[in-house]
Amino acid sequence: MLSTDRSSQNSGHRYLPQIESSDATLSPNQQLLPLTAKVNSDDNLEIGGCEIKRLVEQYGSPLYVLDETTLRTACKQYRDGFAHYYGGESQVIYASKAWSCLAVCSIINSEGLGFDVVSGGEIYTALQAGVESQNLYFHGNNKSRSELELAVTTGCQIIVDNWLELKTLTTIAQESSTQPVKILLRLTPGIECHTHEYIRTGHLDSKFGFDPNQIEQVYAFVSNQPTLECLGIHAHIGSQIFERQPHQDVADVLVKWLKPAQDYGLPMTTLNVGGGLGICYTESDDPPSITEWVKAVSEAVETACNHHQISLPKLIAEPGRSLIGSACVTAYTVGSDKEVPEIRKYITVDGGMSDNPRPITYESVYRSLIANKMSAVLTETVTVAGKHCESGDVLIKDAALPKTEPGDILVVMTTGAYNYSMASNYNRIGRPAAILVNEGEANLIIERETYENLLERDRLPERLINSTNTPN
């Protein structure tokens, strides 16, 4: 990893990378850079043994650079943590909405994790990456009938969110030769946590899950459906959470909801506590480590089960951001700049809101560095702006950087979660390429979109082809 020592020197601050060996005990979610990051003898940033500057020269920019070691380390810490701290059966499943592509799914699958999928596209991607269907858990608050049919026919487990879905699924199950269909029920636990309004999903005023007041009605309905096998219950309280207590609280709430299920002949044996562990986007962020989070959740479930005299259920957790967020950086090439006297200085990069919409969407804060000037004095405070025709296209406000020049490589850290997956073609800009780096080897895992790609699904009506009509 790299840490920053910003000691005062002359007119600015100096970014002094402290190089440490890659250490499997480090928790990836607590790092700003991937575990393999280091500075080479040319004062350039390397990740996975590959120099970022050379990757940009070869593959262009913007460029997502994913470190395989960091991703695998996070998977192992979750998997091994639950095996160590939880006394019953456990399963870690990746919330693939954070970043779903063949390579990411293949790596995580090889580490023995399952997958939380939220669309037919994510189901298809995971299956094509070699994931077995029984390790897919299908989420969503408005699953289409065709998506539910795909999930049923391929053998996914389905997290049922609402009455319409439950009744639609019952009909599909009755018509299907794949019986019984395995389901979990998503409930809203009524737990709020300190996070962005849009990523709080556990409080009562949420579009997700059955209302707690409906629990016994839902149990009664499901108990009369022989084509449905209800394995357990699920809740998710939000994302980018640093507090331990909300996750401990949700364990107690869910265990209490298991008890009345027995009265309806539903011997549910699975408890899915969701995910939501936060990561470091800035030096001031202080999330628990993966191991600390796993320990707290495991102990909370065991304590609740002992209190309510319930056998330990199969425990499922669904990390997304904390698995992949810090494993990736995005590399940009610096372009023009603009000085607004006594207000601010802008520098622009060759990407922006189309490859990272989180700053403009959530006011998310990121950190950056100049990958080809790692020990340069930090003499400027600048606003890093994107290239899109949008005044709000700002990646970072008040970034401390050295003096930059056109052609420098600016790296934004912790971009593995919800950057590629939320990327768009705004302004008809192609989405970036993605590279997987590991032990000095770089592999292209997502090709850069070309102008031709942008037109692949466009269709021009025949009456407009070779039209000689001109506007009046």
Image: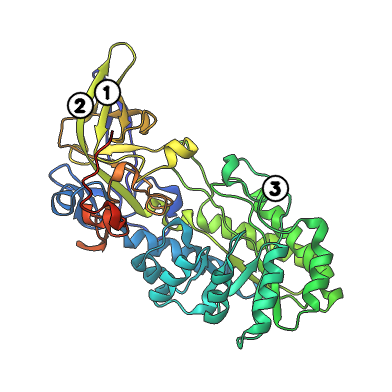
Screen quadrant of the C terminus: top left
- The label nearer to you, 3 versus 2, is 3
The answer, for residue 54, to whether it is visible in the render is: yes
Q: Residue furthest top?
A: 342
Q: For mark 1, give the secondary structure.
A: strand
Q: Earlier in the sequence, mark 2 or mark 1?
A: 1
**Residue bearing mark 3:** 203
Which residue is drawn at the image coordinates 28% and 53% (left, top)?
454
> SS for tag 3?
loop
* Horizontal relation, residue 270 to residue 389: left or right: right
Q: Amino acid at mark 2?
A: Lys
Marks 1, 3: nearer the viewer = 3
Residue drawn at (54%, 68%) of the image = 92
- Give, as a three-letter code, the residue at label 3: His
Task: Locate residue 106: give its quadrant.
Answer: bottom left
Marks 1/3 in contact by CB < 8 Å: the verdict is no
The Cα atoms of the two marked residues, 1 and 3, are separated by 42 Å
The type of residue carrying mark 1 is Glu
Tell me if residue 64 comes above or below residue 373 in the rendering: below
Q: Which mark is residue 162?
A: none
Relative to 159, is 390 above or below? above
* Residue 72 rendering spot, x and y as whole percentages: 39, 65
Which of disc 2 and disc 3 is earlier in sequence? 3
Give me the disc on residue 380: 1
User: Residue 369, position in %: x, y?
Assistant: 28, 37
Q: Are marks 2 and 1 in contact (CB under 8 Å)?
A: yes
Determine the residue located farthest toward the right in the rendered image. 263
Disc 2 from disc 1: Cα separation: 6 Å
Query: Callout 1: 10 Å neighbours few (<14), some, many (20+)?
Result: some
User: Which numbered marker is on residue 403?
Assistant: 2
